[in-house]
Image: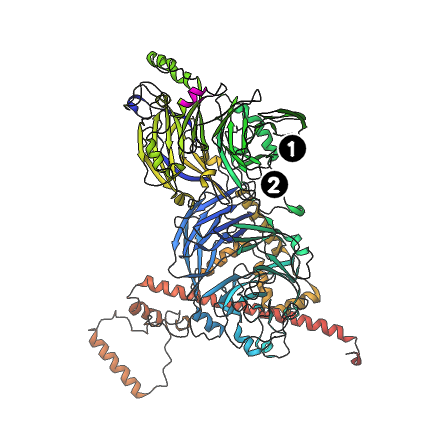
Amino acid sequence: MKRLLHKALHQGEGGTHVDVAQMDAQIALHYGIPYTASLLAFDPVQRLLALATLDGRIKIFGGDNIEGLLISPNSLPYKFLQFIQNQGFLIAISNENEIQVWNLEFRQLFYSSKWNINITAFAVVEGTFLMYLGDENGLLSVLKYDVDDGKLQKMPYNVPIHSLAEAACVSLEDPQSIVGILPQPDTFGTRVLIAYEKGLLVLWDVSEDRAISVRGYGDLHMKNQITGAQRDAGEDEDNNISTEEEREICSLCWASQGGSTVAVGYITGDILLWDMTARSSKQDNRSDEPSNVVKLQLASGSRRLPVIVLHWSSGSADSNKGGHLFVYGGDDMGSEEVLTVLSLESTTGLESTRCMSRMDLRLDGSFADMILISDSGFPYKSRTSAVFILTNPGQLNFYDGGALFSVPKTEEGKAQIEAQKFPVTVPTTDPNITVTNLYSLNGRESQSIPLKKFVVKQNAAPFMQRNMKWPLTGGVPSEMSMNGNYTVERIYIAGYQDSSVRIWDATFPVLTPMFVLDGKVVGVNMDGENSAVSSLAFCSLNMTLAVGTTSGLIRIYKLREHTGGSSFHFVSESKQEVHVVQHGRGFHCHVAFLASNSPVRSLRFTASGEVLAVGYQNGQLASFNANQLSIMFTVDCASGTNSPVVSLSNYNVVTSAAKANEQQKESLQSAKSPANVLLSLTKDGHFTVHDSMNDGTSEEEQNQLSEDKFPSQGHIAKEESVLDKKQTHTVDKSQKNTRQPSHSGGSDSFLLVCCEDLVLLFSLPSLIQGSNKPLHRIKLAKHCCWSAVLTNIDGKACGFILVYQTGAIELRSLPELAILAESSLMSLSRWSYKAGMEKSMSSANGQIALVNGSELAIISLIASENAFRLPESMPCLHDKVLAAAAEAAINASMDQKRNQTPAGGILGGIIKGLKGKEENAKQKGSLSAQTMSEQLESIFLKESLVEPSIPDPDDPIEELSIDDIDIDDEIPLAPPPASSTSHVNKKTTAEEERAKLFEGSSNVEKPRMRTHQEILTKYKFGGDAAAAAAHAKDKLMQRQEKLERISQRTAELESGAENFASLAQELAKSMENKKWWKL
């Protein structure tokens, strides 16, 4: 048994409920990191961090304690997670290839679609709603999310692997899956690096449908040049790789700001840095050209771990000569699991790359994922401000980027800097949480004023070491919480193993830390001051908090702000001490009671808050007067038993008797019942009544009351294990007529007892007078672990909640105890019940607060009269103002680049002439992001022009090319040859036959040769002129595009020629004054 609750249950005539709960359970608030977290994603503009889990959940972290939980309809692991940057959408792909689009503003799943083929690679094009997708068959597809329609559209553009191989002039025996897709920086998504499973790397230009560069292990075997490998001391000098031409790729990332170098990790434990810049065939054939690859080897063993993760951090925003490579894997099998950071530098190119230092970061658990947080919206061009590392189960640590890259290393290469724990709003494991309670202040504005003042002082950003700026600042607080005139209506209190107590403002669906109460008193030594908190009690009438510990010590706090010095009282059975202490501003303990060394199991204030009842582990019961600072009495709850007191409640007999008739009043007076009684319940089922205002009860009265145990004493004795965990509640009931035969007239109180597999409802006055027959007895099919009386915002009882060890949740009616609705922890929060979870469960006004590991959730059960469900009370996960400002800033930056003039003079001409097509690519980058997004969409609206060399058997008719169509209406006939007698005779004969055929008609048109288009219209399109016109139009558009490309290339050649001519003139002028021996 756990507790006794005193709640009001109002009924109308005939026993009909006025307030009947209608359960509509949902997660109203969630804090903490899910223990199944497996993936990380970051929006550099909105400054939001997302975590995907193995059970279909996505957690969002922002600033100002703003957190959100998204729950998928299917409990499936996620394998890809990315933001559509600065747009308020999140793309998630599950292991079953379900593509989901989440709207962060509404916290809803807007679109979901099942992909028919296994998705093996995914990437969102930065600044657009477009995304690349690679599958196990080697097909590169393009998707677009249409904001207006709310759907994902598959674009016509795609690149099959056989077409790409033919265009890249490589041979592939079998289809290979795409294992990585990386859009190249500064190309607006027009160039993308495609990595195939067996080691092939292709930098593909979607605007030109051609391969810019192709790399792979076949090149290494052919050239046999691997240089620049960096090793630790003791590694061998083997520069050669295996003779295998194919090795499986496990990870890859860009290793330069402009996307000229890519780092690739292989299943063998090797890391190769590939130069992806395009080179001419002459350069590739020259033996004196520098190598296009550098090998990095972390360990010298023959059996090494695969390189699972690679991430690149630029050295500085304006330097392209080095950076830091984060590597997970590559070490010898059986070595310590670490995350390796390599500091790389290059002076003249990839061939000069050197590893300057190595640093190993210890992991707090098995590695799950990591992400680099940039200090601006351009990850490849800005400094890394933080490194987040996710480990199992649900451990998230971070490093300050500036401190990490500047920290000195030891001789072994280990980092001297320690990882910092991710700051959590509600600590649950460090320190360990032991007991919680959710309390309602019932709208008492006068009591909440000091709380609000203190909240303003304590609401600050999380503490960071080395003056680090916290990178997660996204989200917008709710409008209601920003209003300074609101009243604190609800608080959440948690006790910890280190004897501290923390309190949060829970008025809105964002927990705001209010204050931390330390278990120690400055200048006073108390026995058990460091003991864990075991029980809590709060009186909203006088804002008094009682804290019980495992050492038997009870601390009392007045939640009113004190200033300066004050007195502290320590009260025990043998002495009373008064200490003068100097307190700062805030809330402090002003009195402590110690009546027993046994752990405190239950606490209860009387209605006025003057008297505090305490139940102990050894079965004792004590009562303290908080105003007079005295111990009123200490007694045993039942004779001959040391069973813990698990539940306490108050009962005012006078108030109940005032509602009864005269006959019942006389009966109560003759029974000599106390006016204010204290109800106690022990773990073994003993129910005891005490006078809460007197110094205990007389010996005769105690013995008599101790015999009032639960009904069917034999049943209790037979099933002790079942009754080990009982939960008891008292329910007030106001009614005129009742249908219960055992209920006496107008008496208005009930005792509700919940055991592991049994629920009992008693008439409390009848039970006090000796009648132990239950009004209702319900046998439960499952083992119950926790229960509570559900009340609405007015404090009226409207239902009864049962939580089972299976995770099932039931809502039952009062007093009939009939099932009204059912739900489960698994469907609501993807939690399963764990032993001891009931210690952290609490409820208030239709909300249930519970803790599971490092997670805290508040479940809203009732939709009506629930402030947690008001849209104005919810914080927003997408900042529209920030999004508009960021978009305007990006457009302004692009316009400024477009207006910049190119470099002039000799140097400008040389640079322009030598760079060729790269200069054209930079001119594309000068356009605005919006223009590039539209141009990219126009490219993807067409099918790829790369066609396989083998004809498609499904196409029986080969269409004519545009060059075969003549636009002229008539084709002139060839001139006749010189006159001859035979030709004239044939012509005369033809005219005569024609005259006979048309019977002398003169209106017959002369036959003419039909055009190619007319023949197609009649025979191919069945005479449909519209279809033929559309076909001709398409061919004309294709011809126009070809002409435009030819014109563009011609202009490039002319520009190059002009540059070289100008260069020749400058060189000629410079050589005029030089003598021949100076040449």
Does residue 113 sit above or below 822 in this rendering?
Answer: below
Q: Residue furthest bottom?
A: 981
Q: Position of residue 544 (x, y in %)?
A: 54, 26
Disc assigned to residue 525: 1
Label 2, residues with CA under 10 Å away: few <14, some 14-19, many ≥20:
few
Q: In the drawing, does residue 157 fall left or right of residue 383?
A: left
> Could you tell me the amino acid type at mark 1?
Asn
Q: Position of residue 138 (x, y in %)?
A: 44, 66
Residue at image coords 63%, 59%: 314
- Front-most of residues 579 and 889: 579
Does residue 37 sit above or below 596 in this rendering?
Answer: below
Q: Position of residue 1033 (x, y in %)?
A: 40, 63
Judged from the image, the secondary structure of the residue bearing numbered disc 1 is loop
Disc assigned to residue 871: none
**Image quadrant where one finds the N terminus:** top left
Does residue 1077 sit above or below 332 in this rendering?
Answer: below
For the residues bearing labels 2 and 1, Cβ distance under 8 angstroms = no
From which residue to which does the magenta span run?
Answer: 690-703
Residue 493 visible in the current orientation? no
Does residue 283 sit above or below 119 in this rendering?
Answer: below
- Front-most of residues 1016 and 587: 587
Residue at image coords 34%, 41%: 782
Q: In the drawing, does residue 955 fall left or right of residue 222?
A: left
Judged from the image, the secondary structure of the residue bearing numbered disc 2 is loop
Magenta stretch: includes residue 694: yes
Q: Position of residue 404 (x, y in %)?
A: 65, 54
Nearest to the eye among marks 2 and 1: give it.
1
Label 1, residues with CA under 10 Å away: few <14, some 14-19, many ≥20:
few
Q: In the drawing, does residue 784 fall left or right of residue 1051?
A: left
Distance between the alpha carbons at the discs numbered 2 and 1:
33 Å
Instruction: Determine which residue is flagged by label 2.
Output: 461
- Front-most of residues 199 and 685: 685
